[in-house]
Image (spheres, coloured by chain):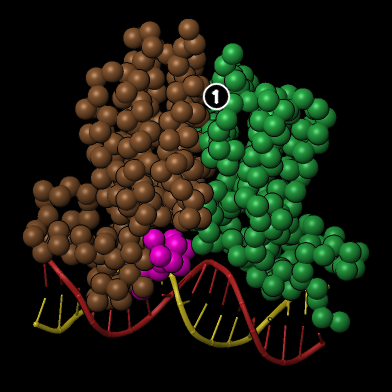
Chain colours: A green, B brown, C red, D yellow
Amino acid sequence: MAPRRGADPEALTFTERARRQQIVECTIDLISTRGYPATSLSAIAEAAGISKAAVLYHFSSKDNLTETTLRHVLDRFFAYVTQRVERESEPCAAIVAYVRAMISYQQANRRHVRVITEMLLDDKGGTRLKTPGSHDTHGRWQALADLLAAGQEAGRLRAFDTRTTALAIGGAIDNVISHWLVHPDYDLDAAADELEAFTLSAIERRD
Amino acid sequence: MAPRRGADPEALTFTERARRQQIVECTIDLISTRGYPATSLSAIAEAAGISKAAVLYHFSSKDNLTETTLRHVLDRFFAYVTQRVERESEPCAAIVAYVRAMISYQQANRRHVRVITEMLLDDKGGTRLKTPGSHDTHGRWQALADLLAAGQEAGRLRAFDTRTTALAIGGAIDNVISHWLVHPDYDLDAAADELEAFTLSAIERRD
DNA sequence: GTCTATACAACGATAGAC
DNA sequence: GTCTATCGTTGTATAGAC
């Protein structure tokens, strides 16, 4: 039977799913330590203990593999943040939970963050990523924009453009994380407090 | 004599400086249209009408060429912003001028911005750029952090960590620009107004 | 001093044997 | 399902023409 190279996990055999999982794990390791350009198919194959062509059997191309890896990482990331946000009923508390979850997850998963910055931030121009997933069909910050809109409707927040403000808050988070990646001694907990205050004073109504 | 591949423009002959300039211009064109990975030395050489080896005569390696190109673009960018900021004497006005200059320059120079996002944002992990220039020795947002510190000393701004806040504002700008690059119909002028208000209400003292 | 020509290892990708 | 063999292309290095 022809190999299935799609992303549908239900349609794969047990061994194939295990192999794919193993290869993706090796890819995360290599990209997060050596960076994307230095991560060749040969290196991935060697790390997985198989041949270069065997990797390309399971994933039709290097792009296919790296995009699968990216989606694998992003799925966990967004699941974590969504779960933390949905605990809160108050709009303002939900926004704070969003900011803190974005930071705390990345703080606890440096390895994954490296993969994201190497691949997704990389792709802001839209030249690299060929198959945009469900995360970016509405934009990476649509979820945050929705939270902001909900806060405005509840009368808790000022009047501003939710899309631009979501981009601003999201970019602020991204940049703080990026700086922390390059400077590990940077106090990320203190930065999270600052960022929360920064965000709230920018969006809350002044009475 | 051995070819000069350094960045010192004074030590180059007229023809060499012209060739280097031409090659850099072709590199900007190709990277901004096709993206970095799709920009090969052969493509650059063909665009410049010379051989691949001739390119490598003027620039010792592809990395050398792309870093020179990036620096070429960044120099103009930062010169523009610095000039706009230094016109203002009031700390708050200087910060506003900074934000607006960052946006207006990038709005007027899409081609250059593409090169920056393809190369510099790319490099947040620090795995790619080998020779950090004067711009990033103190961090990309040090200039903004200094402006914020000056505003605090003048009593105009609240008490906050200038480094984290500079990262937040800078990231906000970056993200808005990135979104505009992908969605050209996004109203960047309106976004600049929003971003200015967002920034001011986050840093100004509440009396 | 400026360049063309050529050779090289490593890359991503394909075809076909087992 | 995994392999070997091979392809075209990439970045790089060297030799030598003018």
The residue sitting at 36% across, 39% down in the picture is B102
Give x and y (percent) for residue A181: 56, 35
In the drawing, does residue A47 fall left or right of residue A89? left
Q: Counting other residues with Cα less than 10 Å from the Cα at mark 1, is it few (<14), some (14-19), or many (20 or more)?
A: many
Q: Tell me where residue B145 appears, x and y as whole percent.
A: 39, 23
- Dot 1 falls on a residue whose secondary structure is helix
Whether residue A195 is situated above or below residue B55 in the rendered picture:
above
Highlighted range, magenta: B32-42
Callout 1: residue from which chain? Answer: A
What amino acid is at disc 1?
Answer: Ala
* Camera-nearest residue between B61 and A112: A112
Left or right of A193 in this view: C18: right
Q: Which residue is painted at 59% across and 51% down in the image?
A: A120
Q: Which residue is pictured at 36% across the width and 61% down the height?
A: B62
Image quadrant in which the N terminus of chain B is located: bottom left
> Looking at the image, which is closer to me, A19 or B155?
B155
- Residue found 12% across the figure and 55% down from its top: B12
Residue furthest toward the right?
Answer: A14
**A23 with respect to B42 (left or right):** right
Residue B75: x, y in percent? 26, 43
Between A113 and A55, which is closer to the camera in this rendering? A113
> Where is residue A188, by image quadrant?
top right
Q: Mark 1 points at which residue?
A: A202
Total tally of numbered discs in the picture:
1
Question: Is residue A76 visible from the viewing direction of this image?
Answer: yes
Residue B35: in magenta span: yes
Quick check: B151 above or below B103? Answer: above
Magenta stretch encompasses residue A159: no
- Visible in this render: residue A47? no
Q: Establish if A182 lies above or below A60.
A: above
